[in-house]
Image (cartoon, rainbow, N blue to C red):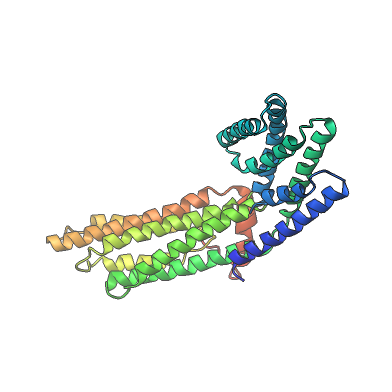
Amino acid sequence: MDRKYKKILLRGIKIALGSSFAIFLAHFLHLNHDISAGTITLLTIVSTKWETVKLSVYRVLTMLFTIGMTWLFFLHISNQWVAYGCFIFLLVVVCELLGWGATISVNAVIAAHFLANLDFSARTVGNEIALVVIGITVAIVLNLFHDNGNFRKELVWHMRCVEWQMQAILGEIAAYLSRPDAAEDVWNELEELEGQIRQYVVDACDYQNNTFASHPGYYIDYFEMRLQQCSVLLNLHYEMQKLRNIPEQAKIAADYILYMKEYIKEVNSPEEQIARLKHIIAGMADSPVPGNWKEFSGKAILYHVLIDMEDFLYYNKRFVDGLDERQRRIYWKEEQSQDKGGKKKA
């Protein structure tokens, strides 16, 4: 089943079970307005663990504010609808200014309970606090259950797919340098890959927000690095379309790209590829000046292509340099242990 539909189905099950159980628990404890506990659970369960925890904290803080403000308005303004309107106005303004707009609905429910009874005794206040505590506790507990193991496997699989697709695209770009009509679809493929990676970034963020581990930002950084590399390759399209004739150095650039594409791997520190590219660029700079404008233009475009490839590699290098020791130990050591040839991907 597609992850999107699995996510919707799982959320529906959580909300249904959580709301029902919250109502049962509130009823078992003989709380007034027990059905509201289910509503609070429904409104508190969001798509990720961290969002649920943060929203729960905000609910508790704004609940205390609501109790104080309802006491102030409801007992000191005789007209009920005016009192409720003044309270709601203040609640919305304060919550929106704090960025806690998601808490407004639950606090409005609590305020309605106080408005109906105009009772601010310790028992009534305790009843409302208990409803909120039950609702958010059930929501937090249910949102601890996520299929993070399979989610992580999917992210790793997507990483491999991106690498394979990028390797294939680089191979087509190398062919394009030799024959501009040999890789007509490469740019469409690249745009499709860029769209896929954007979705993988969203998935990686979702994974990070559903685990309490401190290191899963690795996947976000990885896919963002590949997205930046896609942007570099897309920029090549504009430059390579200008090629009217194929310079002699095109084969050197094509051979380099074919060499480099084999290092589009997760575990790769690209110093060796960067050094080799710098050597090629220096060799081009020392080569004889072209004899006519057409040759000069072709060589200039080819030089620009190589500079773009250097940017491509530096995005990889910045990703590698940004890894801490824990990330290297958790992710790279695991990958290297699977490299049966024993060869470290430089």
The residue lying toward the viewer, choosing from 76 and 344, is 76
In this picture, residue 331 sits left or right of residue 318: right
Give percent across and percent down for residue 19.
Answer: 75, 54
The residue lying toward the viewer, choosing from 178 and 181, is 181
In this picture, residue 278 sits left or right of residue 90: left
Looking at the image, the residue that sits furthest to the bottom is 182
Q: Quadrant of the N terminus?
A: bottom right
Q: Is residue 272 above or below residue 214?
A: below
In this picture, residue 242 sits left or right of residue 31: left
Give percent across and percent down for residue 193.
Answer: 44, 65
Looking at the image, the residue that sits furthest to the left is 292
Q: Residue at x 31, y 66 (%)?
A: 252
Give percent across and percent down for residue 172.
Answer: 36, 71
The residue lying toward the viewer, choosing from 167 and 67, is 67
Q: Residue at x 30, y 54 (%)?
A: 282
Q: Is residue 197 above or below residue 126?
A: below
The image quarter containing residue 157 is bottom right
Looking at the image, the residue that sits furthest to the top is 76
* Residue 15 makes an appearance in the image: yes
Looking at the image, the residue that sits furthest to the front is 79
* Residue 258 makes an appearance in the image: no
Total of numbered circles in the picture? Answer: 0
Q: Residue at x 30, y 56 (%)?
A: 281
The residue lying toward the viewer, choosing from 261 and 63, is 63
Give percent across and percent down for residue 116.
Answer: 74, 37
